[in-house]
Image: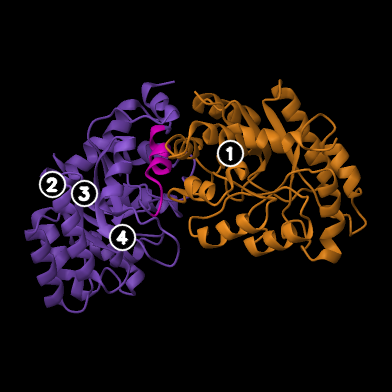
Amino acid sequence: MSALLQAVRRGEPLGIPDVIDVHGHLGSGWSFTVPALGPDGLVATMDRLGVRTVLCSHVSCMHGDVHMGNRLLAQAMRAHPGRIAGYVVLWPGSREEVAGEVRRRLDEGFTGVKLHDANGFDYTDDAYAPALAVAHERRLPVLLHTWGDLNQYEAVFQQYRNCPILLGHAGCTNVEQYVDFARRYAQVYLELAYSGCRCGLAAHFVREVGPQRVLWGSDAPWMPFAQQIGKVVFADISEADKRTILVDNPRKVLGSACGG
Amino acid sequence: MIELFDAWAGFGGGEPGVREQVTAEDLAAEMDRASIARALVRTAPEQPHRDLGDANARLLAACAAAGAGRLIPCGVVVPDTGGDLPSPAQQIDALLADGPAAACIRPEMDGWVLADWVADGLLAALAERRVPVFCRPDHVPLTDVGEIARRHPGLPIVVADVGYRSLRILRPLMRTFANVHVSTGGAFSVPRGIEYLLDAGSAERVLFGTGFPASEPMAAVAQLAYAEIDASARADVASGNLDRLLGGTVR
């Protein structure tokens, strides 16, 4: 048993420096119980596992309170520099509103953009264009909530090729479509957060698209950091590939904002 | 390292559209990798059984071949109300023929319902022998779990594959019915879920399970390993609670 697996079995910190989670959240309160960890609780939980940084969006990404969410996330980032980083979340009221919010939050130190279509708007919505254009121009990561049907997002992949586009919950369903899109678009990355922890998925992605295109995300605190990282540390891939997924890829994608 | 007894694992089933089938040897290899000592096993992925008795017999044979109590069978039971199956007592006797065992129910897949006039002959027989009965919310919604727990307070019921959006139902379910247990693994990606359930007064009724072959075993292993609970509770969840359940069966 590798040192990494032994650490997990014993509930000790992983022992890999600078593990970065590219898919976390701040905030609780949704249509089901989510523990109200708060920024301090989030960081304490990360310390138990040995996770250095979590890139968060506020749960308001799923509804209209995006300004409040971004403001609370900015506070958390200031309270925990280098441990909590932020995706700007947006409400596509108008191009001007989106442009103003994304500019303001990037000036505050946010790292990228997170879009979630639970708000009823497609990622191809015209109002999102200024945010995606800024990400494209500055090579900032864009995390998209996805759930299988990637064809609807292809126009985004075609138009914004300079920014890393992280497909959230990759492989939750339609596994081969995720592989296909990662092969066709060099800026597309497969992010692994998924409640069911499909057996063999991380290894499959590594085999099919290479470890450089796979990222670890937990979706914490909606899902446990520990459960979500377990599938990576146990994946039937080399220890080097695990490090690539947990440390090197996010560092490359996120750049200097996360200590890279 | 703490001993792990996986309450929710399986092999041997066929999934539509998937060529590869997971064998008992595949499961054993995964158990070795994750240092899981023992597993309660069912046919998974779930599939309809052409011959229920034969399917359970093959499961028992595979468990016997694994040796030394490493695999414990969790066979499917079905009411005999259609007149085509052995009586519940006979089905239970067959399951317990080689030693400890549990049962699982999949009403929709096996063509029955949980209404008392269909299910209670089977459930009463299982309760009489205190055979742990496993089910998934896909087959037995949590409201129905509560209903059969109320009708059969002596029946140990274990719900597995409970999703992360279920805490508002799951906690009162376990508080209300002392015979309801929950297994981790599979879709149980509830943050602080083990801690939440233990706080609900269910320390003896949370079982470690992985959900293999659908889910990566180490996901549930890590969830338990990092849970903020004391060593005694962790040991109970890891193996003690399932040992107690299986040990309570009347053979």
Q: Amino acid at mark 1?
A: Glu
Pointer 3 residue: A84
Q: Amino acid at mark 3?
A: Ile
Q: Residue at x 91, y 43 (%)?
A: B90
Q: Secondary structure at mark 2?
A: helix
Q: CA distance from mark 1 to mark 3?
A: 41 Å
* Residue A257: mark in rendering: 2
Callouts 2 and 4 in the same chain: yes
Horizontal and vertical percent for residue B201?
57, 49
- Magenta-tinted stretch: A222-233
Task: Name above or below for residue B210 compared with residue A128.
Answer: above
Q: Earlier in the sequence, mark 4 or mark 3?
A: 4
Q: Amino acid at mark 4?
A: Gly
* Residue B117: mark in rendering: none
Which residue is nearer to you in this view: A227 or B25? Answer: A227
Pointer 4 residue: A27
Q: CA distance from mark 4 to mark 3?
A: 13 Å
Which residue is nearer to you in this view: A140 or B154? Answer: B154
Whether residue B88 sits left or right of residue A131 in the image: it is: right
Pointer 1 residue: B20
Quadrant of res A18: top left
Question: What quarter of the picture does the N terminus of chain A occupy?
Answer: top left
Name the mark nearer the viewer: 4 or 1: 4
Q: Tell whether label 3 touches label 4 (CB within 8 Å).
A: no
Q: CA distance from mark 4 to mark 1?
A: 41 Å
Q: Residue at x 26, y 72 (%)?
A: A65
